[in-house]
């Protein structure tokens, strides 16, 4: 039985989408989902001074891997220079420490970046509308990997925000009817997103571990130099396993029944998957007790 992708390629029809690609697990899974469903993807990453800037390196690495597997993606990083100095958030350079614990705890609100998705959405809408009106008008999807786990902490990940934001875009632009939102993960959690990513890997003939080791979910990545004599750039970025975002990711891999291919570390240095897994299992048990 032919997949949607094979049917589309056989008929030489390609849908188009503009994706917000952070380099995290959710948006990377959505990138795979779009490719598996026959979309030609333009992906935008944003450098807004986030502490976890390694996510953009991972996104670049994933796009290069996909290209090597005949799955090209037009990827560009938009630099919002100087913005971090003006923002109050634990996620940006100079902000407070990123909180640890379960992802449903109230202190996770410290990781909100004011109006972040509105800023991103405006730029994505501009690019998508430009694509839609170049060389003949065509519909273009605006794809975002927002999911059910985001709703409680991040108001700009809720459907009501998406609706009013898109209405403002429609009012302010000609040909805005050519764009539509595509948010297939809106009511899903990280586990079901990871399941979808696994299915997409199978459809596209990609190695699951090769894909997901090229993602970053950690808000507190740890840089470890290869040796004490190395220059600052000669080392490796590891994910922490204690921040809320990492806990949520590791929980998804535990439910999927396979180890996370991302390398983890703590203040003592690199740790095994079993150490990260055991910590998260303890956090979840305490939260549910």
Image (cartoon, helix red, strand yellow):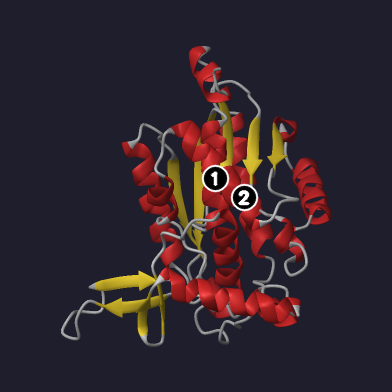
Circle number at residue 262: none
Q: What is the number of callouts on the image?
A: 2
Question: As drawn, is 279 to the left or to the right of 191?
Answer: left
Residue 247 point in image, percent of width and height: 58, 71
Element at label 2: helix
Nearer to the camera, 104 or 67: 104
Residue 103 point in image, percent of width and height: 67, 73
The structure residue drawn at horizontal position 80% and vertical position 52%, both measured from the top left corner, is 159
Displayed quadrant of residue 183: top right
Q: Quadrant of the C terminus?
A: bottom right
Which residue occupies the extreme left position in the image? 229
Circle number at residue 193: 2
Q: CA distance from mark 2 to mark 1?
A: 6 Å
Q: Quadrant of the N terminus?
A: top right
Please say if 29 is above or below 10.
below
Nearer to the camera, 164 or 238: 238
Residue 250 point in image, percent of width and height: 55, 66
Displayed quadrant of residue 95: bottom right
Residue 11 point in image, percent of width and height: 53, 12
* Residue 240 appears in the figure: no
Please say if 75 is above or below 278.
above
User: Are circles 2 and 1 on residues that touch, CB within 8 Å?
Assistant: yes
Which residue occupies the extreme top position in the image? 11
Element at label 1: helix
Crowdedness of circle 1 by 10 Å Cα count: few (<14), some, many (20+)? many
Crowdedness of circle 2 by 10 Å Cα count: few (<14), some, many (20+)? many
**Label 1 sits on residue:** 197
């Amino acid at each position: 039985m032919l997949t949607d992708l094979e049917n589309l390629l056989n008929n030489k029809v390609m849908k188009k989408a503009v994706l917000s690609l952070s380099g995290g697990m959710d948006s990377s899974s959505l990138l795979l989902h779009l490719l598996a469903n026959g979309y030609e993807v333009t992906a935008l990453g944003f450098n807004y001074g986030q502490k976890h800037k390694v996510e953009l390196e991972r996104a670049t690495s994933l796009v290069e891997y996909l290209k090597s597997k005949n799955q090209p993606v037009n990827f560009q990083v938009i630099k919002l220079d100087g913005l971090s100095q003006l923002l109050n958030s634990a996620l940006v350079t100079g902000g407070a420490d990123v909180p640890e614990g379960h992802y449903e705890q109230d202190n996770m609100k410290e990781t909100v970046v004011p109006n972040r998705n509105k800023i991103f959405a405006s730029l994505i809408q501009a690019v998508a509308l430009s694509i839609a009106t170049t060389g003949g008008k065509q519909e273009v999807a605006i794809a975002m990997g927002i999911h059910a786990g985001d709703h409680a902490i991040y108001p700009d990940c809720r459907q009501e925000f998406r609706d009013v934001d898109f209405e403002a875009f429609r009012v302010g632009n000609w040909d805005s009817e050519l764009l539509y939102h595509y948010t297939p993960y809106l009511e899903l959690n990280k586990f079901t997103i990871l399941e979808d990513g696994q299915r997409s890997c199978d459809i596209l003939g990609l190695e699951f571990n090769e894909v997901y080791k090229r993602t970053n979910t950690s808000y507190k990545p740890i840089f470890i130099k290869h040796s004490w004599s190395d220059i600052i750039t000669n080392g490796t970025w590891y994910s922490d396993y204690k921040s809320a975002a990492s806990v949520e990711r590791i929980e998804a891999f535990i439910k999927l029944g396979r180890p996370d291919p991302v390398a983890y570390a703590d203040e003592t240095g690199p740790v095994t998957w079993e150490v990260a897994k055991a910590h998260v299992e303890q956090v979840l048990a305490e939260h549910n007790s």
